[in-house]
Amino acid sequence: GVEITGKIDRVDRHKASGAFRILDYKTWDKKKSSKEVFLTTGAAAIAAAEALNLPLVTVSRSKGVWSDLQLPLYRLAFKTGVIPGLPSSAAAAEPECLHLTIARSETGTGLADDYDQRAFASDAAAQTISAVLARLRAGIFWPPLELPEDFAPLFPGVSEKEIKTGISQTWLDDQHRRLKTLPRNPEATP
């Protein structure tokens, strides 16, 4: 029920083996580990995932919650055969998903070298994607991004709590009401 459009930076196919690789270009200062990119290991994030019955994922021997679903979404698009220009047989393949970092230095530039490909194909990734889509359909955009700087001078008459969280109390109350309407099991959500 949700249409997602986007552009994958690059899909390669090895001439000899026929293997596929999905690459997402990043302009970071250096290559990042999968833990830095995909995983939130904080207690609050893990508690929130458990409250939604989301499975934890293990990436590089660390348990946590998916925090970046870009490559799992690209893999899902690949597996469902919706990427234009790919042969129909591609959906049967299991693509390797990697970031290609283009950094300021030669030593920081290159392919990610520690991504556990099993994580992208895991039930945890698929269930997290389903849960995020269910929240979007329900109009839930929670939790809010906390603003680290002092924005009080820009918002006269707005409470400190609203400024800190970047949201109004009315919106926050609405989000709490909507959260109560979500199914507890993300697999039950179409």
Image (cartoon, rainbow, N blue to C red):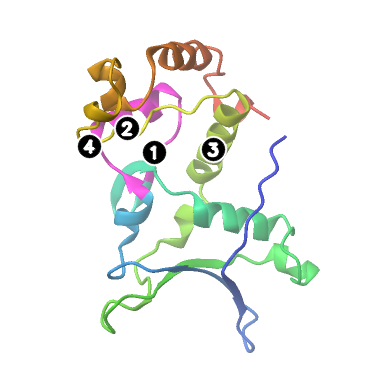
Q: Nearer the viewer, residue 1 or 88?
A: 1
Q: In this figure, which residue is indicated by the disc labeled 2?
A: 46
- Tell which circle, 1 or 2, labels the residue nearer the N-terminal end: 2
In this rendering, is residue 32 above or below 156? Answer: below
Res 159 quadrant in image: top left
Give the structural element (helix, strand or loop) at label 2: helix
Q: In this figure, which residue is indicated by the disc labeled 3?
A: 127
Quadrant placement of the N terminus: top right
Would you say 147 lies left or right of 183 here? left
Q: Which residues are magenta?
A: 39-57
- Relative image position of residue 122 (x, y in whole percent): 51, 48
CB contact under 8 Å: marks 1 and 2 = yes
Give the structural element (helix, strand or loop) at label 3: helix
Give the structural element (helix, strand or loop) at label 4: loop
CB contact under 8 Å: marks 4 and 2 = no
Q: Is residue 78 magenta?
A: no
Res 151 quadrant in image: top left
User: Which residue sits at x=45%, y=26%?
Assistant: 53
- Mark 2 residue type: Ile
Q: Which mark is residue 56?
A: 1
- Mark 3 residue type: Gln
User: Which residue sits at x=31%, y=70%?
Assistant: 31
CB contact under 8 Å: marks 4 and 1 = no
- Relative image position of residue 33 (x, y in whole percent): 30, 62
- Tell which circle, 1 or 3, labels the residue nearer the N-terminal end: 1
User: Which residue sits at x=34%, y=27%?
Assistant: 166
The crowd level at tag 4 (other Cα within 10 Å; few <14, some 14-19, many 20+) is: few
